[in-house]
Amino acid sequence: MGGKKKHKGASYTKDQQKYLKRLEKDLGQQLASKPKRLAHSLSVARTAEELAFAYGVDPFLARAAGTLHDWCKALSGDEQVALARELGVDFGVDLETVRPLLHGVIAARILPERYPELPPEVWHAIAVHTTAAVEMSPLDEVIFVADGIEPLRHDTPGIERTRSLVGKVSLDDLFWESFVGGIVYVLEGARHLYPGTVDVYNGLVAHRAERERKNKETA
Ligand SMILES: [Fe+2]
Ligand SMILES: [Fe+2]
């Protein structure tokens, strides 16, 4: 996102600035043993804030959700599976097969107790940042995309393409690029594809076709 006007936190109230600092400090403790994950999280938060400004989404909520989205990555894979089981998380498949997807949902279940002042939109964005969903709010899309393109992520053709589209296409289209790029990554790496992802894909395709049809009608 080079050359773009950088927006500073000046538009936040003092309380909001303080609150964001507190979240960053808490995250620093939570991910103290995982400096790369910590740096990634803070980078997602900044990227989400920039996307929020670009697409008219609440930047404070974007920063907060971005900061906390990988909170549960402090846990080992086994611990994440155990916690997901304890919380009754249901992916419709053996949780062992979806380990990389669990941390969003479990964070969204446990963090509201710690940060009750943050609204449900934040927890939803965190819950769906790994899986996406058929119904994605603009904040959900901002967090999903920011997670995929934050500047510390190594460049791949797909990531570079999504980065190049920021501000040039709609947020829905930007999210679509990022989502499809994620699936391609899974397929090319011969990784396990969560069956729920196919349902989300098909649901999004139907939504996009419907939108296209409506656009044609009103054109
Ligand atoms: Fe994540
Ligand atoms: Fe992440």
Image (cartoon, rainbow, N blue to C red):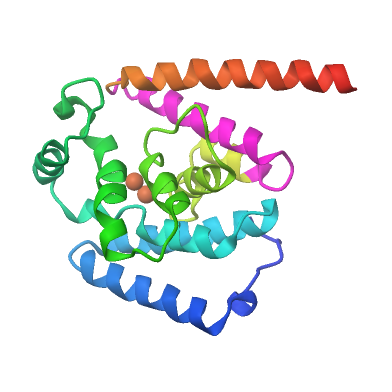
Residue drawn at (44%, 53%) of the image: 122
**Quarter of the rendering containing residue 24:** bottom left
Task: Determine the residue located farthest toward the bottom in the rendered image.
Answer: 14
**Quarter of the rendering containing residue 172:** top right
Q: Where does the image place residue 46, in percent across and percent down from the top left? A: 51, 63
* Secondary structure mainly formed by the magenta segment: helix
* Residue bounds of the magenta highlight: 164-191
Q: Quadrant of the C terminus?
A: top right
Residue drawn at (71%, 66%) of the image: 5
Q: Where does the image place residue 213, in percent across and percent down from the top left? A: 76, 15
Q: Considering only vertical position in the picture, is 46 above or below 141?
A: below
Q: Considering only vertical position in the picture, is 62 above or below 209?
A: below
Task: Give 77 or 2, whichever is nearer the viewer.
Answer: 77
In the displayed structure image, the side of residue 69 where residue 180 appears, left or right: right
Q: Where does the image place residue 21, in percent across and percent down from the top left? A: 41, 77
**Quarter of the rendering containing residue 3:** bottom right
Q: Quadrant of the N terminus?
A: bottom right
> For the image shown, how many numbered marks are present on the structure?
0
Q: Where does the image place residue 66, in percent across and percent down from the top left? A: 44, 57
In the displayed structure image, the side of residue 77 where residue 92 appears, left or right: right
- Let me know if residue 22 is in the magenta part: no
Residue drawn at (13%, 48%) of the image: 76
